[in-house]
Amino acid sequence: MSLSYRQPGVVLTDRRFTVPLDHADPGGETIEVYAREAVASDKADQELPWLLYLQGGPGFGANRFVGRQSWLDRALADYRVLLLDQRGTGRSTPVNRQTLPLRGGPAAQADHLARFRADSIVRDCEAIRPQVTGGAPWTTLGQSFGGFCTVTYLSFFPEGLKTSVITGGLPSLDAHADDVYRAAYPRVERKVTGHYDRYPQDVERVRRIAEHLLERETLLPNGYRLTVEAFQSLGLMLGTSDGSHRLHYLLEDAFVRTPSGLELSDAFQEQVQGLLSYASNPLYALVHEPVYGQDARPTAWAAERVRAEFPQFDAAKALAGDAPVLFTGETVHPWMFETDPALRPLKAAADLLAARTDWQPLYDPARLAANEVPVAAAVYHDDMYVDAGHSLATARAVRGLRTWVTDEFEHDGLRAGAPRVLDRLLALARDEV
């Protein structure tokens, strides 16, 4: 039974659906998928077209808006919106260290996790669409990984789509994970350099923190082991519109004087713990590299292997000289399954997933070349998370796809520029720009 309730300016309805765990075995085990329907209060009784929101990630549930926040306000002007918790996230049969042991041992867990990529997500969408729209195609809005899912959707079920809008999420159609990270590390270095240009005082602050972590073991309050590599991974923040500023404020209060000398402050440790822990989104760490798997080559911890090609990211070497310590970006490493208590029980399954060689294609280049669905995509000029060169190559490969290339926003442009970003892309898809 669906439950409806109100927030300022919007009527929300909880929707639950039953879908096959493995869509190749429709008569087999099922899972529950949750979505939140949103409609403007003054249009609750109207027949409106549907917009399906596909969240970034992988591994994150849909936004939990309060009222008509952010881009949702613009969307509700024209649509009923379905905020989907993709399988394994939010309220959609969550996957984590507590639930995965129900599947069995590491091998069974890895087999289970292989069903949580874009191909399964869009099949879920097609399974629930007739129940939501009565069979009519819907418009999709894909942010980041949600854009990856959208390109998979266009590849295999274009009949389900009326229009598609993508923000910061046009994937390469054929790049291996190695290629993705080989392109990523130079972008990350540019972002770090830009941060130090803006806040030159942070160069010395970061060196002091890195030295401290190399000299002594540091356990955060939740048991997370804060190594220098883990500290460097805070660079993930630098790909967002306000990330450089938030990182600066975090660094300026790192140390406090104690009877035994300078120590990392409780406040600093508490903030870092919240930024580094995968307790709320473990699926991100587990399937982050498998979302690039499309052939018989294993992903094999690509980000860790490729990092060795960029020695400037080695903190110890930087500290031995006078080079700044570089942060890293959107990368998942095997050591995270040792430092993070939320991931430690899943290390064996993660290793098996990294070694997997039976990945199925996520995109159909021939189908995309014949695409008839109106598609518009925002490509952020120096996006730290998704390579703009890869995105533009894909844009050229998808028939009729229109791009808006901009350096006005970072990867979170949909949030930072809402509702203007969504309005422009919807107009672009309708060929009104």
Image (cartoon, grey):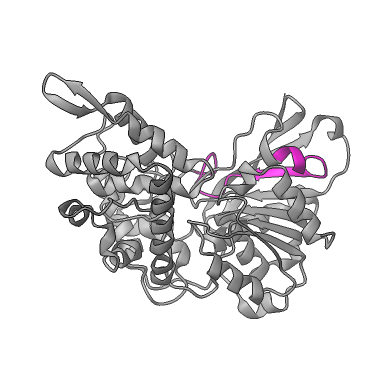
Magenta stretch contains residue 10: no
Q: Is residue 375 above or below residue 32?
A: below
Q: Quadrant of residue 4?
A: top right
The reply, left or right, for residue 26 in relation to residue 419 is left
Residue 138 pos. (x, y %): 76, 55
In percent of width and height, residue 126 lies at: 68, 58
Q: Extreme top residue here?
A: 259
- Magenta run includes residue 91: yes
In the image, what residue occupies the spot 27% across and 41% down?
A: 204
- Front in this rendered view, residue 214 or 45: 214
Whether residue 407 sits left or right of residue 354 in the image: it is right
Residue 94 versus residue 185: which sits nearer the camera? 185
Q: Is residue 215 left or right of residue 100?
A: left
Residue ID at (19%, 36%):
218
Give the residue displayed 62% in from the left and 78% down from the top. 365
Image quadrant in which the N terminus is located: top right
Q: Is residue 102 something one can see in this rendering?
A: no
* First to last magenta residue range: 72-93
Q: Is residue 2 above or below residue 167?
A: above
Quadrant for the C terminus, please. Answer: bottom right
In the rendered image of this protein, does residue 78 appear above or below residue 141? above
Q: Compare residues 284 and 403 and report the one nearer the observer.
A: 403
> Residue 146 location in percent, x, y?
59, 55
